[in-house]
Amino acid sequence: MGATPKRATIYFQPEIHRALRVKAAETDRSMSELVNEAVGLSLAEDADDLTAFEQRAGEPDLVFERVLKDLRRRGTI
């Protein structure tokens, strides 16, 4: 982990809490490990999305109707 972990109080829906407890027991991992991994993956996905957005920011905007018309013309849909 590196740095000293920080403590937080998180409230789960009962069914999510139950599933998390079961998964922790089945995988011999702590609930904290599972939650940290899930949050880390979610944040990494957000970072990937932002990077892709920044890389494509200079591309021209496409009008949906024109794209749809072109796809129909080419027989794609």
Image (cartoon, rainbow, N blue to C red):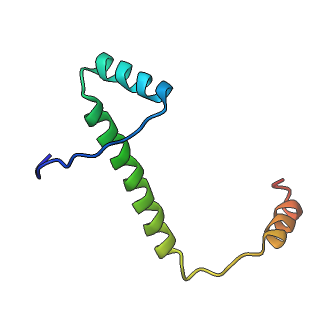
- Number of numbered discs on residues: 0
Indicate whether 21 appears above or below 5. above
Q: Quadrant of residue 68?
A: bottom right
Is 41 left or right of 74, judged from the image as shown? left
Residue in the image at 29% along x and 30% along y:
31
For the residue pair 50 and 25, the one nearer the viewer reads as 25
Is 29 left or right of 58, judged from the image as shown? left
Q: Position of residue 14 (x, y in %)?
A: 47, 26
For the residue pair 26 and 61, the one nearer the viewer reads as 26
For the residue pair 11 and 50, the one nearer the viewer reads as 11
Is 50 left or right of 3, judged from the image as shown? right
Q: Position of residue 7 (x, y in %)?
A: 22, 46
Q: Quadrant of residue 27?
A: top left
Indicate whether 52 appears above or below 14. below
Q: Position of residue 25 (x, y in %)?
A: 30, 17
Residue in the image at 54% along x and 79% along y:
57
Q: Position of residue 65 (x, y in %)?
A: 84, 70
Is 12 left or right of 32, judged from the image as shown? right
Residue in the image at 24% along x and 28% along y:
30
